[in-house]
Amino acid sequence: MTTTMTSVIVADDQPVVRRAFAAILDAQPDLTVAGTAADGAQAVRLAHAVRPDVALMDIRMPEMDGIEAVRRIVADLPTRPIMITTFDLDDYVYDALAAGAAGFLLKDVTAASLVEAVRIVARGDALLAPKVTRRLIAEFAQRHRRAPRAPDGTPLTPRETDVLTLIARGMSNAEIAAELVVSEHTVKTHVARLLAKLGLRDRTQAVVHAYETGLVRAGTGGARE
């Protein structure tokens, strides 16, 4: 049986952190580190050279910060960035969401959680560090409140709205299918359509949209912690 390999780049200005994360990921049978970078500018060049599936990015780096690097990477590549953050960087996290980050981890992440995070994001799911999920998204939504409609004014169908709400609660496609008593293929179709209709890049942005539009509110059954 052939293992599908996920390629990753690691960008962090601290050599010890950069090498440690790279070593952890490269030791996995289904992950390969395609390169490392010491700053955002290097990360952008590296990403364009190797076209990784996932980019693990520190937020604060010299030359170019991780947020601007993410913005440039996702503009040209299907690479899914994971940002490394700390509690005192919440304002940067809001900007990273807008830039196209697919997920977030805290600096003190364990090796097992780091590996699982890369796998989760590589398969297209949203990733938000459990300790910050509801608070972060709720605060982001309050700062960036907007109307619950597609850019062209097209409303979501009732079923698309149901699917979006369940995505924001942290459910996988299989769990959504069970909740709505439909096939997983049907759920995948609804997810693809609502992302396209709303002009969203991925499930992480869908979670944010659900909070922004009031479909889900912090403390009332939102994204899992």
Image (cartoon, rainbow, N blue to C red):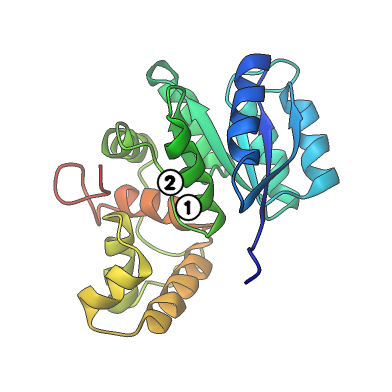
Placement of the C terminus among the 4 image quadrants: top left
Q: Amino acid at mark 2?
A: Leu
The answer to whether 115 is drawn above or below residue 180 in the figure is: above
Disc 1 versus disc 2: nearer the observer? 1
Asked if the residue at tag 2 contacts the one at tag 1, i.e. Cβ–Cβ closer than 8 Å, the answer is yes
Earlier sequence position, callout 1 versus callout 2: 1
Q: Amino acid at mark 1?
A: Ile
- In the rendered image, is residue 171 in sight? yes
The residue under label 2 is 127
- Seen from this angle, which residue lies furthest front? 1
Placement of the N terminus among the 4 image quadrants: bottom right
Residue 42 point in image, percent of width and height: 80, 28
72 on left or right of 157: right
The residue under label 1 is 120
The answer to whether 82 is drawn above or below residue 199 in the figure is: above
Q: How far is the residue under mark 1 from the one under mark 2?
A: 7 Å
- Label 2 crowding class (10 Å Cα cut-off): few <14, some 14-19, many 20+? many
The kind of secondary structure element at disc 1 is helix
Please report the residue visible at 77 percent of the width from the left and 50 percent of the height from the top: 51
Residue 136 point in image, percent of width and height: 34, 34
The answer to whether 27 is drawn above or below residue 120 in the figure is: above
Residue 90 point in image, percent of width and height: 41, 24
